[in-house]
Amino acid sequence: MECTVEVFADGGRLKGCVSLDLGALKDRGFTRATFLDALNAIARLTSDDWAEDGIDAAVIDQLRSTFGEWHQQLATPSSD
């Protein structure tokens, strides 16, 4: 089971993770590749895009960093 996804709420990081397998159970089209595509799309968002969606400017860099870490983890082949 791959532990990759953390959760953000109210601007704070919550400890814990979710298996990508759970996403696949909910949506057959959900794969590592589709999640990487979504992370690529998120990486293209500007600060104005985030603000337009109501994201507090104080957490934008933290979110970008976390999503970048997820992308790096998923794009790197596992040694399992």
Image (spheres, rainbow, N blue to C red):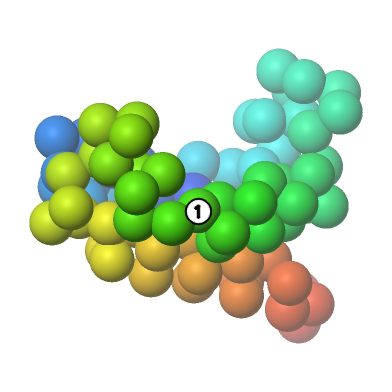
Q: Which residue lies at the image location 86% right of the left edge and 28% below the top edge?
A: 29
31 or 39, nearer to the observer: 39
Q: Which residue is mark 1?
A: 45
Q: Which residue lies at the image location 34% right of the left edge and 49% below the top edge?
A: 48
38 or 69, nearer to the observer: 38
Q: Which residue lies at the image location 13% right of the left edge and 56% below the top edge?
A: 58
Relative image position of residue 10 (x, y in whole percent): 14, 35
Instruction: Determine the image quadrant of residue 24.
Output: top right
Q: Is residue 53 left or right of residue 32?
A: left
Relative image position of residue 16 (x, y in whole percent): 33, 47
Compared with 30, 6 (above or below) is below
Relative image position of residue 76 (x, y in whole percent): 73, 78
Compared with 73, 24 (above or below) is above
Q: Which residue lies at the image location 86% right of the left edge and 23% below the top edge?
A: 28
For badge 1, the amino acid type reads: Leu
Relative image position of residue 4 (x, y in whole percent): 53, 56
Q: Residue at the front extreme? A: 48
- Whether residue 48 is visible here, answered yes or no, is yes
Q: Is residue 20 left or right of residue 34?
A: left
Dot 1: what SS? loop
- Whether residue 78 is visible here, answered yes or no, is no
Compared with 49, 26 (above or below) is above
74 or 62, nearer to the observer: 62
Is the residue marked by circle 1 packed among few (<14), some (14-19), or many (20+) residues within 10 Å? few
Compared with 1, 61 (above or below) is below
